[in-house]
Amino acid sequence: MGRPDDVAFGLEADPLLGLRPWLVTQRPWLDLYGVHVKPVVSKPNYDPALIHRCLPDELLFEIFVRITPHSLGRGACVCRKWRYTIRNPVFWRTACLKAWQASGPIENYKIVQSKYEWSWRKMWLLRPRVRTDGIYVSRNTYIHVGVAEWKITNPVHLVCYFRYMRFFPSGRFFYKNSSQIVKDVAKSMTFHASKADSIPSRKREEADSVFSGHYTLLQDEVDAAFLYPGLHPTVLRLQLRLRGTMVGANNRMDIISLVTSKETHNPDVPAVSHRRGLNPFVFVPFEEVETSVLNLPVDKMDYYLPG
């Protein structure tokens, strides 16, 4: 039996059969025999961005190593190249080991392996942490009745005060209770301001009202405590719960309990649990302390919902 090609050729050569064209098997690839096709040459990878042509990848890597994780997230929105570069696990491993340095590197490696599939970036976004690039602020108000003189009704005043907390990765924090606004207090929540010997008298008074304590972080709960000095020292203990308005934000802290107790060994002196002034803490980054809505006076801010 002959090949199909021979059969088709024999049918085409015989004019008596009157073969129709659709009975011949079509093979388009046979038309390419003897035709020389030029190879496709890929175009060189040309980046039109001036910063990418002038800034080497090695120098760009060194810049990303030295900026904060929040700035890394902003840089990932610039272009595709920066986004792929910032996904390098080296950047996020450094940030995670610094943020949870109180747990130790061995414990952090165990957590990223067991819970986050060796993804340091995923650990940074999903694991609760206290932010150290700003201040947590709790705005509280209460009604104060004034003294009436030559009037029928007593005047009523709306008093506003703030609780400020600044955390450090080492497990230390600063606390301040004041009626001053955020942009005035942010300058005193530093280690340099706490050194009262080398600062003016006014700044010294502000530094004396900044108290230092220690905190522990377990899952999303923060336990903080510090000592009020004085003739009768008082210990203030705060139990907080971290949350965020978006993934990885950690920009809110709810006050679960606030307890004060005298630093005595007398069991007859009970601890006092406070029920007022427990509004949630709102995180304010340092670059936003001058423009934060918390700087507005009481007459321009009738109410404030931290969310």
Image: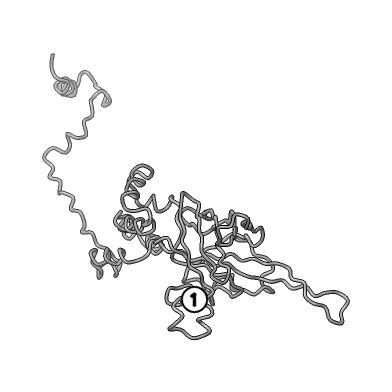
Seen from the viewer's position, the closer of residues 298 and 162 is 162
Q: Is residue 158 above or below residue 75?
A: below
Residue 301 point in image, percent of width and height: 66, 70
Seen from the viewer's position, the closer of residues 168 and 289 is 168
Residue 25 point in image, percent of width and height: 23, 26
Q: Is residue 59 above or below residue 117?
A: below
Quarter of image, res 304: bottom right
Residue 76 point in image, percent of width and height: 37, 60
Residue 35 point in image, percent of width and height: 13, 42
Please tell me which residue is depicted at 18% across the width and 53% down the height of the picture. 41
Would residue 81 be found to the left or right of residue 70 on screen? left
Q: How many marks?
A: 1
Q: Residues within 10 Å of mark 1 (few under 14, many from 20)?
A: many
Seen from the viewer's position, the closer of residues 170 and 229 is 229
Would residue 122 be found to the left or right of residue 263 on screen? left
Would residue 226 be found to the left or right of residue 42 on screen? right
Would residue 144 be found to the left or right of residue 94 on screen? right
Q: Is residue 21 above or below residue 167?
A: above
Residue position marked by numbered label 1 in the rendering: 188
Seen from the viewer's position, the closer of residues 92 and 4 is 92
- The residue sitting at the top extreme is 1
- The residue sitting at the right extreme is 152
- The residue sitting at the left extreme is 34
Quarter of the figure that contains the C terminus: bottom right
Please tell me which residue is depicted at 69% across the width and 71% down the height of the picture. 159
Please tell me which residue is depicted at 46% across the width and 54% down the height of the picture. 217
Q: Secondary structure at mark 1?
A: helix
Q: Disc 1 marks which amino acid?
A: Ser
Please tell me which residue is depicted at 51% across the width and 85% down the height of the picture. 201
